Structure formats: C-alpha cells, structure tokens
Image (tube, rainbow, N blue to C red):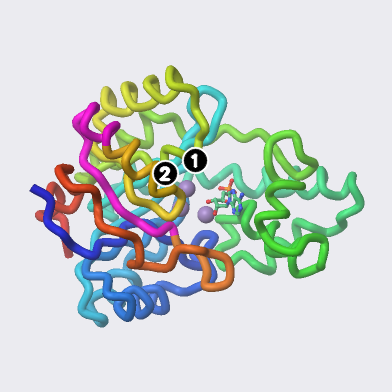
Amino acid sequence: MTTVLNADLHCHSVVSDGTLVPEELAGRAARNGVELWSLTDHDEIGGQARAVAAAHEQGLKYLSGTEISVSFIGKTVHIVGLGFDTQNEQLRQGLRDTRGGRGQRAMEMSDGLAKVGIKNAYEGALTHAGNHELISRTHFARFLVETGVCRDTNEVFRKYLTEGKPGFVEHRWATLRDAVGWITRAGGMAVIAHPARYRFSTNEEFALFTEFKSHGGRGVEVVTGSHSVAEYAIYADTAREFGLAASRGSDFHSPDESHTDLGTLPPLPVGLTAVWDLLQHRVQ
Ligand code: AMP
Ligand code: MN
Ligand code: MN
Ligand code: MN
C-alpha cells in the first residue's frame, strides 16, 4: 500500500538547467512541506553531496537522483534514476559520456541561430550555465529572453529550439538499455520521466514501456508538473498494467519559469505502489 508522503523526486539545480543552488532548493522544499526530496539534475550527479547535506540540514529525507537523456526510436526520452550509489564508477562514466557531446551540440545550435541573425548565442548561453559541462537548450532559451528576442522561454522553444527550428540539432544520447542498466547496477531504481511529454503513438509507448521493463526499469512518473490531471489517471493505469511503481515530482527548475513549485502536486492516485515504498533501504 502506498504511504502518503509529500515526496518530490524530480527537480533541477544550477548543476544542470535550474537557477537555484541545492541549498536554496532544499530550503524551498522544506518550506513547502516536502518530506522526502531528490535533486535530479540532467546527466549529472555533481550536486548530490551538497543536496543530501542541505536536505539533512532542513530535516528532509533524501534519495540520490539524476535524469538521464536517452535516444529511443528517434526521440529523446528522460529516465530518472533514484536511490543509486553516487560513487558507482560505471554510472559516473555513463553520465560523463552522456553529457560529453553537449559542448559540440551547443556550438552547432549557435551556428543554426547565427543563420537567422542571432549572434554569439553560444557565448550568451554559457553565461547562464552554472556548469559548463552541462550546457542545455534551457540556457540558450534564457539568453534569448535576456536579449529580448522572445518574451519567455516557452516562446524560445516553440520558435527556435524544437525539431525543425533554426537552433535545433539532432543529438544521440544514451541508449535506454545503458541508462536503465547504469542506474540499476548502481543499486537504484530507473523511472520513466513525464511519459505524456513524448507524444508517442500507442504502439511506440507500448514499445518504450516494454523495453524499459525488459532492461530492469521499475518505475514511472504519474504525478508530475508535466502532466495534466487527466494524465495522472492515464499513467496510473499504465503503471498498474505494466506492474511499475509510481513516482511524483514537480520538475521544478526556477521560481521565474516553473509553474509547479516543489512539493505542491496532489498525492498519487490510490492503489499504486509508490517508488519510495520500494526504496526505503536507499533513503538517506
Ligand atoms: P536539453 O537537455 O539541452 O535538450 O534541454 C532540455 C530541457 O529543456 C528540458 O529539461 C526542459 O527543462 C527544457 N524544455 C524543453 N522543452 C521546453 C519548453 N517547451 N519550454 C520550456 N522549457 C523546455
Ligand atoms: Mn530541464
Ligand atoms: Mn525531463
Ligand atoms: Mn527534469
């Protein structure tokens, strides 16, 4: 049975594309009533030591976390890892390899933007990146807002950074098998992040969930800042159908950009197994 707990197991710090440092996130989580927290930076665990220390300072329980970028049937899928050993060398190397291509990708994005008259976007994006190994589309979006090209980051993504747009560059991320394997072999649980975001067909989504399970994946985000209320119910059914544990997380990035704050989502639908009930032995 699910333990009702204010768990927020998905958010980002300046170590990836968030705007707050781990200590600010922990404080904000505590003020919002979070009891169990995880910092899940994209392809990075460089913020984990600070996050767990800050969590304990605030009286929060903590699970180690990351969000790995994966290429699956031509689309990017995100796999959250929870409760792994942050010292596991295979996981650390896998994350290093996954973020390794970001610098080159960013320069190519910048070239694409230059062709439509937006100059020095690479340098501009870097000024927003707290971690130069982790330059992301979000940092480009902040630069384009700062320079007045667009009103908000949503508009930047729509006009410049999504498939077919001038700043979009195809990229090969980790494989689903590798990402799930790294997390699982490091003692953690792999969780499909915000499944409704991918806009897969029924068959594609079936393939994702089936392959994910076959590689050892055990969880799916059901209640996330990226889902509508109707989608909570849809992915609650998917979790039951595939025998997956359910997760909950805001995907908070920034007080200025994120519409869902830490710890403010509704509880998981009843009758699901929560990921935190299976990860009790990994809670710090
Ligand atoms: P990247 O890993 O460099 O491809 O950047 C992906 C990140 O961009 C995601 O984690 C989100 O934080 C952000 N993002 C993606 N789509 C949008 C959007 N439509 N509006 C705002 N941010 C977005
Ligand atoms: Mn992000
Ligand atoms: Mn994501
Ligand atoms: Mn995220």
Q: Residue at x 41, y 25 (%)?
A: 205
Q: Position of residue 132 (x, y in %)?
A: 60, 61
Q: Position of residue 276 (x, y in %)?
A: 18, 53
Q: Amino acid at mark 2?
A: His
Q: Secondary structure at mark 1?
A: helix
Check disc 1 and report the residue beneath it: 197
Position of the C terminus by quadrant: bottom left
- Density class for disc 1 (Cα within 10 Å; few <14, some 14-19, many ≥20) is few
Q: Is residue 92 left or right of residue 144?
A: left
Q: Nearer the viewer, residue 102 or 190?
A: 190
Q: Residue at x 28, y 65 (%)?
A: 37
Q: Is 240 in the magenta?
A: yes
Badge 1 vs badge 2, beta-carbon distance below 8 Å:
yes
Residue stretch in magenta: 237-251
Judge: label 1 CB < 8 Å from ligand 3.
yes
Q: Is residue 52 left or right of residue 18?
A: left
